[in-house]
Amino acid sequence: MDIELKPLNLPGSDDRPFVIAGPCSAESREMLMSAAGNLVGYPNVLFRAGLWKPRTRPSAFEGVGKEGLAWLSEVRKTYGLKVCTEVASAEHVELCLKSGVDALWIGARTSGNPFSMQEIAEALSGTDIPIFIKNPLNPDLKLWIGAIERLQKSNCLNVHAIHRGFSLADNGVYRQSPLWQIPIELRRLMPELKILCDPSHIAGKREFVFGLAQTAMNLCFDGLMVEMHPCPEKAKTDAEQQLTPEQLHDLIAGLKITREEDQRQTDLELLREKIDKIDTEIIGLLGERMQISRQVSRIKKEKNMSVLQINRWDKLLKERMQQAEKRGLRGGFVKEIFEQIHEESVSIQDEMLKEDK
């Protein structure tokens, strides 16, 4: 069974993205049927509901479990919607396949555990059910790719990815940090992979979901996974980030869809050529800087000086950040760049000082 990730068409609207939508948790049969009823008329939507919830603390609501599979089956029969749920073990997989669930997703806490991923991959071996893999909680692209590859090597060929943000010490206004560069790099490394965005989990609050969803469309993501609840304020899990049915409709209808072919305009290509030229110049300048670092190292070696001159480094960093802010650049952004440059410079000098010892 295959689910095509094609545009979702709303009556009287332009192309809309593929959407997976529904409540965070299947709390009761009545709530689930109510939520699903609000999605009737969306011809390319996949209905989601979590049955097993791997919560941070054991006192939190952890889902209704396998009892909810009968409710998802009723949704399929009553409304004709395709349904999906989260799995975190081989047992979950077996129960879902037996029940006829149309698609599965693997959550962030599971995708970051190679042992769990191997168990799930073996349970799914040879199946063609669509599987959506969320990124691990920590920003580790190799770990995310590893989870995807475990399924692919188990002959699961209908595998997709979902970007749901990353957990950092400081996530700013969001619940999770978007770190868009990571799914962009995943796209570069695995261009055939379909990548969706879960703005609900990145946002943490429903007022941020709209903006994040539009950013995902601007970055040419293949679709969205959005949490929707008939009465979000009464939700047992993730109440603050779930949309009402009306808000979900407004979100889908209001998105501006960016297509890659629309970006191939002459003015855009000219700007990209300028960026490419600047990037090449940056690489050249970095090479020159490291050559000078080698010369500095020779002098330090001759004069028996230490690699790290902390006063010089502190002065340099402050001056570069001031220069950056005068040009409208964020000081923190430039600080990170120069910290990386300085680390590489120190490493080069350290290696040279160790020579001939």
Image (cartoon, rainbow, N blue to C red):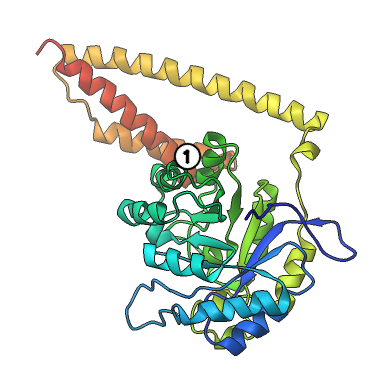
* Residue 275, position as x, y percentages in the image: 64, 28
Q: Is residue 225 above or below residue 262?
A: below
The residue at which mark 1 appears reads as 334
Q: Residue furthest left?
A: 357
Q: Is residue 321 left or right of residue 232?
A: left
**Residue at 29% across / 16% down in the picture?**
296
Q: Is residue 11 above or below residue 156?
A: below
**Residue at 60% across / 82% down in the picture?**
32
Q: Quadrant of the C terminus?
A: top left
* Residue 105, position as x, y percentages in the image: 51, 61
Q: Is residue 122 left or right of residue 240?
A: left
Q: Quadrant of the N terminus?
A: bottom right
Q: Is residue 231 above or below residue 221?
A: below
Q: Tag 1: Cα neighbours inside 10 Å, few (<14), some, or many (≥20)? A: some
Between 274 and 220, the residue placed more toward the observer is 220
Q: Which of the 4 image quarters holds residue 306?
A: top left
* Residue 272, position as x, y percentages in the image: 69, 29
Between 23 and 126, the residue placed more toward the observer is 126
